[in-house]
Amino acid sequence: MSNISPLFAVDGKLSLAIDGFTPRKAQTDMAIAVEQVIQSKSPLIVEAGTGTGKTFAYLVPAMQSDKKTIVSTGTKNLQEQLFHRDLPVVKKALGSNRKTALLKGRANYLCLHRLAQNGASSLLDKQTLAEFTQVRHWASSTKTGDMGDMKTLAEDAKVLPFVTSTADNCLGKDCPVYEDCYMVKARRKALDADVVVVNHHLFFADMALKDTGFGELIPEADLVIFDEAHQIPDIASEYFGESLSSRQIQDMSRDIEVVYRTVLKDAKQLQSTAEKCKMIAADLRLLFPENAQKGNWRQMLNREDVQTQVSKLTDSLTVLYEVLKLHLGRDKDLDNIFERVSEARTKLTRLTDISLQGVSLWYETTMRHIILHLTPLSIAKKFASFVNEPKRAWVFTSATLMVDGGFTHFQRLMGLKDAETLALDSPFDYPKQAMLCVPRFLPEPNAREMRDTLLDISIKLVKASHGRCFLLFTSHAALRAIAAQLEDKIENPILVQGTTTKRALLENYLANKNAVLLGTGAFWEGVDVRGDDLTCVLIDKLPFASPDDPLLQARIEDCRKGGGNPFAQLQIPQAAIALKQGAGRLIRDESDKGVLVICDNRLVTKDYGKIFMGSLPDMHRTRDLQKAIDFLQQIHEGDNEE
């Protein structure tokens, strides 16, 4: 008999302590499965449909056990929600006194050393200086040093690099204010806690030993739980690879400038050599088109002008390395910069080695910078060895892990072929609560007239849903085109992704009872809008990854070489999971009602359409757009009657 089941019963601790808690079989089944793997120290993969209550299903057995637990979530927002909302509720209900801690990546904590160092700097422009004054004022009262507590500061404030540290520029134990460091305090608290909440980026930064100093936390854990586990393959790949950017070189140059102006005023050569390095890296960026893009770095290395510039960069980093070497031991910050330059040289050598097998060499440009990447084509082997040694319990859960009725895709990507699997349906009554419409007479997805059709359908849906609508797009170009045309055609306020932060857009949407929200990737997942605030979701087309993506191209090529079918093994499963995520925005609780419209006839005309349809919730299905419009009008009339 499970020790967990009684806690979830009608008269159990959760029902008694939490208002509105009702036992759900799927939730109890998941909790029992988690309890079992804690005992057996093995991996478990769970797809838990929306509304299952998966958070409590893994938190309760974790809190009931005496095992050191790491819970990793997809984003900082989810991390905070879990720590500040869900964990306290479970803790109170169980009467548990287990210690909990929240740990973020180092860029989220104020760095006292950089604050002091840049306080004397004349390198800050007017706006950054104003932000710097704000931070300095806040620094005198903060207990945690968590930059997220500074509500007046924008998420992308220009001052942040001047007052936070990176793994590169942190002095570690050599830092003059090491004992007062907020990052160190947060890590100590995490080491001392029984349950630590992190996010995937932080977990894998540590696992790949990129961020030393946090390395002792994971080895201590007996239980690791990944929520939003569908994101892991991509995030893990990023951390098992390497990258170098012109921004890193610019930062090194700026840090040398600060040391030269404040401590080593006799070392003019340092400053001029660093400046030269920065200019050469900036000139490499100028060899690429002005607009941000991604591309194949191996191919680019065949270009003579690129080769010449890379060679110049290699030489200038070598000169900088030699000049820094002359001043070693004179200043702790300078010694640290020497290590960074040394690492940048090594990385550049690897990132320009076209003989490497099993990896993708690719680049991406932003408006001002270029980033070179080396990414492994598969992480399965590396991750499998990590999961098997030493033995501990692993739980991977999400509402979207299965494709075509099975877990094979996720297991293959992660090297988890022997893991236990569990599929739990959502408790929602989808046939009654929701309608899925793939309208008749749609042009082909890439046809010219598709934009007009999309605009026409959007206008009708916005009108029928009185604006309580998400219009989700697979590309920024489609988003911008429809947003521009909609403005003259509807009265409703239009909120467009990219005009402000994701959080601000959502707050505006909820405050404005007839607004329409247009988004791409960021709004396909991790957004929870309940009730009549969202009654309609339109998706422009099947979310296949861009065929220009250099990493995807390399994986396709690798799959072909191994005799596989990349379309079936990579592209379809990836797109099916993304579509499932987008569709999941619509119905968030038992009383929600709504319409999902997908404007892509391939769902009906192509054989693989069945895989996509089979992965979506069991909504009432129609090809008649008018029926979907009628359903929306009924929902709205029902709300008015109430």
Image (cartoon, helix red, strand yellow):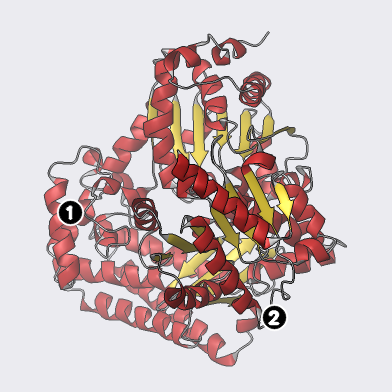
Mark pair 2, 1: CA separation: 51 Å
Left or right, 78 with reference to 600: left
Left or right, 582 with reference to 641: right
Name the residue rendered at 39%, 60% in the picture. 339
The residue pinned by badge 2 equals 447
Q: Can residue 530 be seen in this view?
A: no
Camera-nearest residue between 336 and 528: 528
Q: Which image quadrant is residue 86 in?
A: top left
State the image coordinates of residue 635 (x, y, percent, origin top left).
54, 47
Q: What element carries label 2?
A: loop
Quick one: quadrant of the C terminus? top left
Q: Can residue 242 be seen in this view?
A: yes
Q: What element carries label 1?
A: helix
Camera-nearest residue between 60 and 9: 9
Camera-nearest residue between 74 and 578: 578
- The amino acid marked with disc number 2 is Ala
Name the residue rendered at 84%, 62% in the picture. 565
Which residue is outermost to the front? Answer: 641
Which label number is shown at residue 155? Answer: none
Q: Which of marks 2 and 1 is in front?
A: 2
Mark 2 and 1 residues: CB-CB less than 8 Å, in contact? no
Q: Against 429, is 311 above or below?
A: below
State the image coordinates of residue 314 (x, y, percent, origin top left).
47, 78
Which residue is outermost to the right? Answer: 563
Q: Which image quadrant is residue 155 in?
A: bottom left
The residue pinned by badge 1 equals 135
Is the residue marked by circle 1 packed among few (<14), some (14-19), or many (20+) residues within 10 Å? many
Name the residue rendered at 61%, 23% in the picture. 24
- The amino acid marked with disc number 1 is Val
